[in-house]
Image (tube, rainbow, N blue to C red):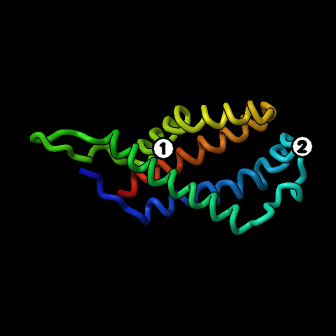
Amino acid sequence: MMPEVNFLAIIVAALIPSILGSIYYGPLFGKQWYDSLGKTKEDMVPNNMALTYGLALLGAFVLSYSMKMVIEGMHKGVENGELVFNSFHTFGHGALHGALACVFLICPVLLSMSLFHKKSGKNIALNLVFWILCCSIMGGILDSWN
């Protein structure tokens, strides 16, 4: 039995990395991020903007959908021998699930990749914090917006 899926919530959650990224890597920490890469803002303009942002959005959609399935899997219970998807659906609870999923699934991959790409500690920290924030907000949206 699969949980019901609210695709509007999945789409809204999938927009979070783009929305938060424009703030986080823009006015909030943009200068520090560019400095951590040894690059300028102009250096970081994608060669094919439509392809880059399109694939990033597709990846965020896959992440959002997967996160919803993981969160619902953690909410399952058994009633009369049937698997029931229910339980404690709040923004904070979903944010916790999102943060934990990120820390235990996404951050190790980002850390490993960043180390082999010889990224600076500052760059690694900025990226890890960004994704923990993204996944927390995404998880909150996905869990509370059933």
Give left or right: position of 99 versus 114.
Answer: left
Q: Residue at x 81, y 45 (%)?
A: 33
Give left or right: position of 2 versus 128.
Answer: left
* Circle 1 crowding by C-alpha within 10 Å: few under 14, some 14–19, many from 20: many
Q: Mark 1 vs mark 2: give the one in front.
A: 2
Q: Quick one: quadrant of the C terminus?
A: bottom left
Q: Quadrant of residue 77?
A: top left
Residue that label 2 marks: 38
Q: Residue at x 65, y 55 (%)?
A: 20
Q: Residue at x 45, y 59 (%)?
A: 10
Give left or right: position of 48 versus 72.
Answer: right
Q: Secondary structure at mark 1?
A: helix
Residue 57 lies, with reference to residue 112, above or below; the image says: below
Mark 1 and mark 2: span between their CA atoms? 33 Å
Residue type at mark 2: give it.
Gly
Residue type at mark 1: give it.
Ala
Residue that label 1 marks: 95
Residue 71 lies, with reference to residue 6, above or below; the image says: above
Q: What is the x, y in percent for residue 63?
A: 51, 51
Q: What is the x, y in percent for residue 67?
A: 45, 47
